[in-house]
Amino acid sequence: MITPSRIAMARKRRFLTLAELSEKTKIAVPNLSKYENGKQEPSEETLRRLAAALNFPLSFFHQPDLDPIGQDAVSFRARSKLAAGARDAALTASRFAVELHRWIDERYRLPPNDLPTLGKPDPETAAEMVRARWGLGNAPISNMVHLLEAHGVRVFSLPPEFADINAFAHWRDGTPFVFLNTMTTPERGRFDAAHELGHLVLHGDERSFMGPEAEKEANAFASAFLMPQSAVIAHMPENPLVEQIIAGKGNWNVAAMALTYRLHDLGMMTDWHYRRTCIVLGERGYRRGEPRGMASRETSQLLDKVIRGQRAKGVGLADIARELHVTTEELGSWVFGLVITGRTGDNSGGPRPDGRPSLRLVPPATSTPQLRKVRVR
């Protein structure tokens, strides 16, 4: 027996309408609709055609139902208004990644959720409270992805075809999830991670993730979390030159535009100086990218340790994909494209009473900040 909903999930994952799938498979739309609604069972040959067109193994369609992730529970950080097809595809991909999390959770003891419940503080105060709870002080954060994972957030990558979605987050059975686009600049990726942390802390189950006000709050949280007010005031001059901003952004590994906005928000730039700086930065390419930026983007420490630990046991990415009933390519798109190298060795801790080894995630160092007053000679 096949599971009808899995045909619909696979179709949505590939951005296909029923008419488009019909064109690819030469199966009539009414029949496809019956397959998805469970009103008719496709023949084995028809199922093979569907599996080939959708790039999923046959076994995928024989697995149990997967309860979907509702769009109301997700915050999408997108470059423009998101089309329904892209939204559904992203939600489906994230649901599959949740299954990978379940697979990992059955084999390893993962860091517990340590996101605070803060009530309804303003974003600036919330950022300070999270920093205090996590013992970060006002030091720069060396790696946002590692920081989130060390405090119980499960971080996965978005498949590359979701170019218009920067990031999104949601809660699932008490576990926070964040999905990041790997095609943006490293600095944008850090801000997106902090933005989604803001949604998880400020909104979650009690307040809506969606809407302009929620986005504004998450942006303000990310800005304050990455660039603490006292640190920015101490290490940046008022109304700085463009070259001072470009030099200063490396202190916090943020985009030049993000630092400019933060300075203006803190009252350290006049309106005129802010507008003029944005124009000059745009002319130098800082709206489209991040010249003189970070050399590489941040990736997952947890997933890397899991994959290496499994590889040491003779279990490769293809074996994991087979257990999850997806292709290796599909699985790789959720795990930041991590590639197994020649190094082996189980990076997990020793076995626990329940038989699952405990993953040791090293929080990013924040005790030796490199902040200095920015000067241009």
Image (cartoon, helix red, strand yellow):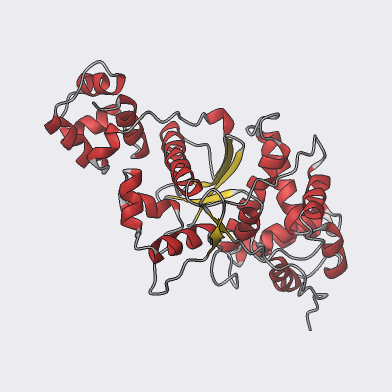
Q: Position of residue 6 (x, y in %)?
A: 33, 31
In the image, residue 26 above or below residue 159:
above
In the image, residue 136 above or below residue 167:
below
Q: Position of residue 248 (x, y in %)?
A: 74, 70
For residue 318, which quarter of the picture? bottom left
* Image point (47%, 50%), residue name: 107
Residue at the extreme top of the image, as rendered? 39
Query: As rendered, which of 200 and 273 lies closer to the eye?
Result: 200
Query: As rendered, which of 304 and 198 lies closer to the eye?
Result: 304
- In this view of the protein, can residue 164 be seen by the observer? no
* Image point (56%, 58%), residue name: 359
Query: As rendered, which of 1 and 145 lies closer to the eye?
Result: 1
In the image, residue 359 above or below residue 26:
below
Q: Is residue 254 left or right of residue 83?
A: right
Q: Position of residue 292 (x, y in %)?
A: 60, 73
- In this view of the protein, can residue 214 be seen by the observer? yes
Residue at the extreme front of the image, as rendered? 353
Query: As rendered, which of 340 and 269 lies closer to the eye?
Result: 340
Q: Name the quarter where the C terminus is drawn.
A: bottom right
Q: Position of residue 288 (x, y in %)?
A: 55, 59
Q: Name the quarter where the N terminus is drawn.
A: top left
Residue at the extreme bottom of the image, as rendered? 377
Report the number of discs.
0
Q: Is residue 240 left or right of residue 192?
A: right
